Amino acid sequence: MDIIVCVKQTPETAEAELRLDDSGKSVKTAGLVFEMNEWDEYAIEEALLLKERLGGSVTALTMGPEGADAVLRRCLAKGADRAMWLKDEAFKGSDAYATAKTLHAAIKDLEFDLVLAGTQASDDGYSAVGVILAELLGVPHASMVKNVDVGEGRVIVNRELEGGLEEVVDLGMPAVLTVQTGINEPRYVSIMGIRRARKKEMALLGLGDLGLTEEEVGARGSWLSVERMYRPPVEKEPIIMAGSLDEVARKLAELFRARGLI
């Protein structure tokens, strides 16, 4: 069972104060902490679990600028066998389609049974890279996967649907699966794993190595372009009432009366 896992480095923004850059089309990344995309943590874990049950190999693949190799080192430390880093200034500004084209160029000549990826990325939320990649590779796919059961030449998966429902899909292999959170419990990276990761292979591939042109990648090779990013306008502001409990209760009653609620 040979598995390729597509992972991505994304900024941690839950507690960060985001600011737009001078172009107004992106956020400033200076000072932000970068880590592996949450959904991809589950994808690499599922690949490792399949390898432990069925044997084979796991190859981690990422596309990103300087520093993006940190997510590959994390995958290697967890137990991945190899890593591939797609790094080129020409890749900057790629949308989901251009990203999938770049990943396809790296994967198409490799032997694989499954390609796993996170359902979406926390920075753009496209949820499209995996399914576009499957179309380019010409293989079946399933998205929002919550369970994987591999048989002889086939894979049966449970897909998460709306309203708490699940769908069972039987696919031939090779196939592409985009993994939902909660499918497993991602393992921690051990000190021994970090040491072993230093000795594992990491291939660095640029535009020329992939046989692509600058017109096929980056902003020029994208279907979508960002026109503007902005904070949503504040339409309603909260009313903060200060004072003692009696004073606040009186003000609240007056507000309800003024608005016809009592």
Image (cartoon, rainbow, N blue to C red):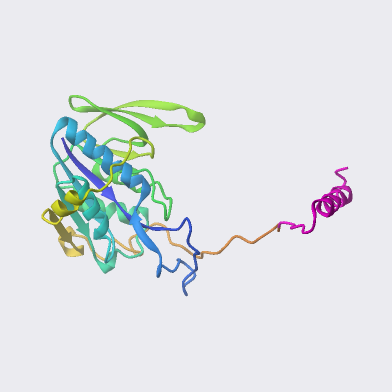
Quarter of the rendering containing residue 186: top left
Task: Give the quadrant of residue 158.
Answer: top left
- Of residues 198 and 87, the one drawn nearer to the viewer in this rendering: 198
Residue, far bottom? 22
Tell me the quadrant of the picture where the N terminus can be found: top left
Tell me where the magenta segment starts and ends, as one range.
238-262
Image location of residue 32, percent across then percent down = 40, 65
Q: Position of residue 128 (x, y in %)?
A: 38, 47
Q: Where 66 falls versus 121 (above or below)?
A: below
The residue at the point 31 percent across, 54 percent down is 8
In the rendered structure, does residue 260 fall within the stretch colored magenta? yes
Vertical position of residue 65 compared to residue 104: above or below: below
Quadrant including the C terminus: top right
Residue 157 rendering spot, x and y as whole percentages: 32, 29
Left or right of 48, for residue 39 = right
For this rendering, which residue is in front, 61 or 81?
A: 81
Q: Is residue 42 magenta?
A: no
- In the rendering, at what x and y percent does residue 232 appear? 60, 60
Q: Is 262 situated left or right of 154 in this image? A: right
The front one of 154 and 196 is 196
From the viewer's side, name the closer residue of 174 and 255.
255
Residue located 42% across and 27% down the image: 166
